Amino acid sequence: MAAKEFDIPELPTYIEIPELKEGVMDGEGPFKSSEEFQEPLGFPGEKIDNWQEVAIAKMGELKSKYRSVQVFLDSCVKCGACTDKCHYFLGSSDPKNMPVARQDLFRSVYRRHFTFAGKYFPKLVGAKELDDDMLDDWYNYFHQCSQCRRCSVFCPYGIDTAEISMAAREVLDAVGLGQKYCNQILGKALTVGNNLGLPEPALKDTLLDLEEEIEEETGVAVKYPLDVKGAEILLITPSADFFAEPHIDGLIGYGKVFHQDGVSWTMSSYASEGANFGMFIGSYDVMRKAALRIRKAALDLEVSRVMVGECGHAWRVAYSFWNTLSGVGAGAADEFGQKLQDQLDHRYPQPQHIIEYTYDLIQKGELEFNKSENDDRTVTFHDSCNVARATNMGGISGGQFILPREVIKAVCNNYVDMERSTIKESTFCCGGGGGLLTDDLMEIRVKGAMPRMQALKEVEKTDGVDTLAAICAICKSQFSKVLPKFDFDPYMIVSVHQLVSDAIVMDKPQTDDSDAADDAEEETTE
Amino acid sequence: MSAISIFFTALFYISLIVFLVGMARKIYQFWITPAPLKIPTAPTQLTQTGVVMRMAREVALFESLFKSNKWIWLFGWLFHIGLLLVLLRHLRYFWPGDLPEIFLLMQPFKYAAFAMVIGLGGLLARRIFVQRIRYISAPSDYMMLLMLLIIGISGAVMTFTQNHTDVLMVKEFASGLITFDWSNLPTETHFLVHILLVFVLMAIFPISKLLHVPGVFFSPTRNQVDDARKKRHISPWALQQEQEHTVRLEQTLGKDE
Ligand code: SF4
Ligand code: SF4
């Protein structure tokens, strides 16, 4: 299928709310998943015959299992406050990308089947049947939502379209209409251990290469340990960190910080993935399965700390959901959860974000930086949706905004924020989150990136910003792709730990050296 | 009692019962539906006190709406505060016997009717003229505003124009509804329209978007404490799944076996 031609949005000085253009983003949606990817997750391989019946039953089940779904479906007053808050609407002008209109695709069917008014007066309350057209709209438009939750910040009742999108995708999976990108990746993550399908030997090779490269470059033997039993820290990081640019420079940075701290750490080949696409497809069970792999790795490797690398939704799942899903944290009820909690060192937050870790070391004065290494850059920080709106760092109010900025400022002299209404809790999504980071969704990805690109363009003009730092693997990949479409340098996107990596002053490991010297002496004397 | 009085008396009780039963059922449904995951939205609150304050600001000041859209906030808030004050003032009609002094203080609340009507008018205008809001509006959304607007205007007409209705008779009727000592009501059209719409609104409350009133208190993005790392949050169904080991690592998943 040839990619559809589309216009790249212009970047205005101010974002104007567009006129509605109905149907501009109509379409078939992303590639559909096939039996091969559906069945391992427990979903039907293709669209089932009695899909309507099953879908309605599933809706009923979900609204009784999720208070969010039930309350959000009932509470919207159609005030319209959220209508101009979605980057996909701002970039595409398609009214069905207005958060409330997106919810209404689901709500109108809910009303028809589950409410008195919708059953008896469907026209009056906008209740609709779940017919083929509606199902197509669901598949298309619920895959034009990155579950970024920006709309939820601005809704007077906190209605979170992400919850509705997740529910809708779960219904779609239940009738055999899965999305190929997410479900294929989940298959790999749940069998091989990471989204790339990278088996242990390949992972090991990659990390060895990395170690060699760094040693050559810096003269310091920074290690990237894999499957080391008894290490203190288990690092769970998105697998993109092993390969992709600019992600890998972030991984290099983590390693350098660990090295300087002198802590023992490891990664796991069994759970070599921080990302958890189970969240994107809305499946509690799939999400839990991915989380359980991490628990197993932590138990097997007997670590006392679990840490998470730079990945937005991974941090949401880890911070907000792991304790619920698998008992990383406190108060687990089952045997393995309790075992893990006994094993973990509760002087540290569990799980901890790599930014929290680096920030703590900086606070304690344990890292030394040569900030001038970053003097050729003027940096701005992109708050990734999931980190910004669904998590915390450092246990202080707004810590998820403060800590990354403090880390950047500790290693860079030139830092500028983008416009206030586009950062922190109001941050604009990169355009590629929520399972949309696939080439078959390129049009919506580019259009959805417009508001972020606009704010970036402004600080480029006013402050000469030439570096965009982020702590999310999806953001980094998405920006690499879309930056050039808006006349930016694709290499301007960096990991926060790349900035750390470039400025950190590495001391040669004296203890190792003297050990080595001792060893050598012993050898010669023998 | 006149036929019309009997009709309205009956309608009041029917609406009231529909309202109470409907709301109780709905609130019970919201209550028992578990929130399996922690999903507070930023700016999240790290303590229970913080959450209570956040909810208070949300309910009293419409904080999120203020951040979102100043016009909708202005009209929405005017309408709600107007309605609240007017409702408080209406208590005088239902109070059996002489009024305690506090009601004197509520006398000026009658002017809140203007806030209410202006707010509603603004909201209706936006619904009609702002393309995005028109797009998301169903007939019931206009109907709801119109009903409230007619209630507000008819009330204001009785208070501020020469078309006063017999207030003592209203009080006798209204307080009679509470004490089950029923009596006739005035029969001016604007008064009848006023209370008819109020009763209807009461009855459709539990089956309409007016459910946002209890809904806001149950909204997990607003009412949850952001403490997932410290305290385990788990829903009954998820706990049961955990105990029954419904999700296992070893099971299925092709190559894993
Ligand atoms: S802001 Fe909330 S209540 Fe208003 S239309 Fe959007 S979802 Fe509905
Ligand atoms: S969650 Fe984000 S992408 Fe989805 S409707 Fe809301 S603002 Fe748009």
Image: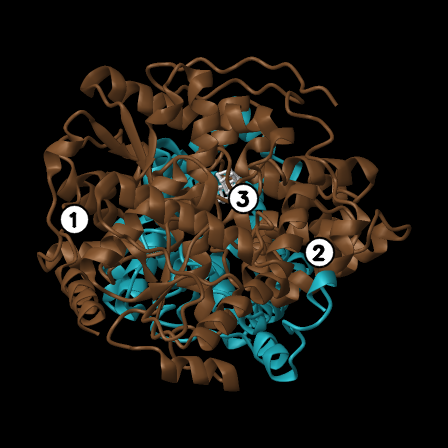
Q: CA distance from mark 3 to mark 1?
A: 37 Å
Q: Please indicate whether residue A338 sits to the left or right of residue A292 in the image.
A: left
Q: Please tell me in which quadrant of the rendered image residue A436 appears.
A: top right
> Which of the numbered marks, if any, corresponds to residue A434?
3
Q: Which chain corresponds to the colour brown?
A: A
Whether residue A66 is visible to the viewer of this picture, yes or no, is no
Q: Which residue is mark 2?
A: A115
Q: Position of residue A214 (x, y in %)?
A: 30, 44
Residue lying farthest left?
A365
Q: CA distance from mark 3 to mark 2?
A: 30 Å
Output the chain of dot 1.
Answer: A
Q: CA distance from mark 1 to mark 2?
A: 65 Å
Query: Both on one chain, marks 1 and 2?
Result: yes
Q: Which residue is mark 1?
A: A506
Q: Please indicate whether residue A324 sits to the left or right of residue A41 in the image.
A: left
Whether residue A142 is visible to the viewer of this picture, yes or no, is yes
Q: Residue at x 50, y 28 (%)?
A: A448
SS label for mark 2 = loop
Mark 1 vs 2: CB contact within 8 A:
no
**Palette colour of chain B:** cyan
